[in-house]
């Protein structure tokens, strides 16, 4: 049995690594239309939040809270959407999306809404730098 953590190839292809928190790898979606982080617990074989131990579930929600605060700092929003769907990618991951009234998908879901727009290199670098500094204390 493989006990190493492997990031699902689809998640890897759609994101840029922000860094690692105590439990989760933090990823930024490659779509400049939305401030959108994905947290993936670095444990093999997880599908549901309930697959985590009670202690790790508490850690997960602390990390989701920190990710939401970091997103709000870089992209003030009207609503923070948090979801762990897993209908396409089964590997346990939690989306944290800063939504603004009138954004490209408002008021519907961001999943499958239009075509992703790439970040400009400088904008991506600045966003990653800021997110890393905000999440570093964890």
Image (cartoon, grey):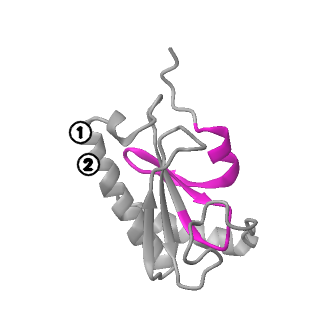
Residue picked out by circle 2: 58
Image location of residue 36, percent across then percent down: 55, 65
Crowd tier of the residue under label 1, counting other residues whose Cα lies within 10 Å: few below 14, some 14–19, many 20 or above: few
On whether residue 18 falls in the magenta region, the answer is: yes
Image location of residue 123, percent across then percent down: 68, 75
Quadrant of the rendered image containing residue 108? bottom right
Q: Relative to residue 69, is residue 128 drawn left or right?
A: right
Residue drawn at x 43%, y 77% as measured from the top left: 79
| Residue situated in front as seen by the camera: 89 or 66 | 89
On whether residue 11 falls in the magenta region, the answer is: yes
Residue drawn at x 73%, y 65% as measured from the top left: 116
**Mark 2: which secondary structure?**
helix
Query: What residue span does the magenta drawing correspond to?
Result: 7-36
Crowd tier of the residue under label 2, counting other residues whose Cα lies within 10 Å: few below 14, some 14–19, many 20 or above: few
Cα–Cα span, label 2 and label 1: 6 Å
Q: On residue 54, which mark appears?
A: 1
- Height in image: 24 above or below 117? above
Image location of residue 137, percent across then percent down: 35, 61
Circles 2 and 1, Cβ within 8 Å, touching? The answer is: yes
Residue drawn at x 61%, y 60% as measured from the top left: 111
**Mark 1: which secondary structure?**
helix
Going by the picture, which residue comes out furthest to the bottom?
A: 102
Image location of residue 122, percent across then percent down: 71, 74
């Amino acid at each position: 049995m493989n006990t190493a953590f492997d990031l699902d190839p689809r998640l890897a292809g759609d994101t840029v690594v922000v860094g690692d928190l105590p439990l989760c790898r933090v990823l930024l979606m490659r779509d400049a239309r939305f401030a959108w982080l994905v947290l993936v617990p670095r444990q093999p074989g997880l599908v549901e939040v309930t697959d985590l131990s009670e202690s790790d579930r508490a850690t997960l929600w602390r990390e989701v809270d920190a990710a939401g605060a970091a997103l709000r700092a870089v992209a003030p929003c009207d609503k923070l959407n948090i979801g762990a769907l897993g209908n396409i990618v089964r590997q346990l991951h939690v989306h944290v999306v800063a939504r603004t009234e009138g954004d490209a998908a408002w008021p519907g879901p961001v999943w499958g809404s239009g075509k992703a727009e790439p970040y400009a290199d400088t904008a991506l670098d600045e966003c990653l730098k800021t997110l890393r500094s905000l999440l570093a204390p964890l």
